[in-house]
Amino acid sequence: MEKQGPIGVFDSGYGGLTVLAELRKKLPHQDFIYFGDNARAPYGNRSFDVVYEFTLEAVKFLFEQGCPLVILACNTASAKALRTIQQKDLPLLAPNNRVLGVIRPSTEVLGERTKTGHVGVLGTTGTIASQSFPIELSKFAPDTVVHQLACPMWVPLIENQQYEHPAGRQFIAEDVQAILAKSTQIDTLLLACTHYPVLQQQIENLVGPTIQVVPQGPIVAEKLEAYLVAHPEMSARLSKNGEVAYFTSEATTIFNERASSFLGGQVSALHHSF
Ligand code: DGL
């Protein structure tokens, strides 16, 4: 029988940790390997080709670590690299392995969350420019109107832990005002970048109680659980000891310190660079 392996979780940096935390809550028996490409983050302003190249390297690395299934816990990578990897690379690299993203699961449920039919989507420049959210959402909730805003400063503010400084708060407040100015009917704001859940409280304070702020982690966890039920052949290939290992392309001391603030527990990462 084939050796079982963990689920790989990839992000450009720390953002995917917000998804990993929800995956571990929902699927506590599964093993996970997290890889953060922190040395090359952020990806948000990078070109299509570069995001694809970096993401493919990460997927290959996670396959080498024995992961039969990899989650791109990064909207930018999901928007710019997922389809090419699924259609072009996977059949050559490892046809029985799977790579899944975070955009499709979010758009599957977003239409059910809004009462007014107007949703706001906040993401990186790359994610918003890709139009992935309006395109995907039109398949599941064609009547939903999508108002998008790129927030290029948010990932750097989060990666550098400056989102609670006055200048950081000012940037965030201006962007929140800018998306709300697009329509008075917005009642749902999707945090379409896995870094943004650390700003959830700050954003909720800005928008008030009539607008729901939706992070992706719980949605992705619920959809992954359903995927594993629907794909017992994949579930059988996954190891289940409740363990998690972390890799970063940055210095591990930096990663361990900052990752702990995302996860609220001690992390001891290993280094991997390309
Ligand atoms: N967490 C990534 C996302 O969801 C951040 C991208 C970046 O590195 O800019 O898009």
Image (cartoon, rainbow, N blue to C red):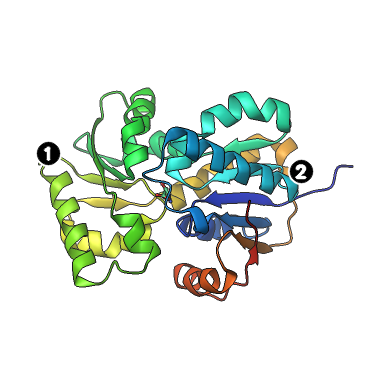
Label 1 element class: loop
Q: Amino acid at mark 1?
A: Ser
Q: Which residue lies at the image location 26% right of the left edge and 39% below the top edge? A: 114
Q: Which label number is shown at residue 236?
A: 2
Give the image location of residue 77, x and y in percent. Answer: 48, 41
Quadrant where the image shows the N terminus = top right
Q: Is residue 220 above or below residue 198?
A: above
Find residue 32 and name its label. none
Answer above or below: position of 30 versus 111. below
- Classify residue 78 as left or right of residue 167: right
Q: Quadrant of residue 110?
A: top left
The image shows residue 213 at horizontal and vertical percentages of 28, 52
Looking at the image, is 227 positioned above or below residue 144? below
Q: Which residue corresponds to mark 1?
A: 183
- Residue 96 position in % (x across, y down): 73, 32
Give the residue displayed 43% in from the left and 43% down from the top.
Answer: 75
Determine the secondary structure under disc 2: loop
Q: Nearer the viewer, residue 53 or 242?
A: 53
Q: Residues within 10 Å of mark 1 (few under 14, many from 20)?
A: some
Residue at image point 66% right, 30% down: 90
- Specify whether tag 1 is near ligand 1 (CB below 8 Å): no
- Quarter residue 97 falls in: top right
Residue 268 visible? The answer is yes
Residue 210 appears in the figure: no
Crowding at dot 2, Cα within 10 Å, few <14 / some 14-19 / many 20+, comes out as some
Closest to the observer, 30 or 63: 63
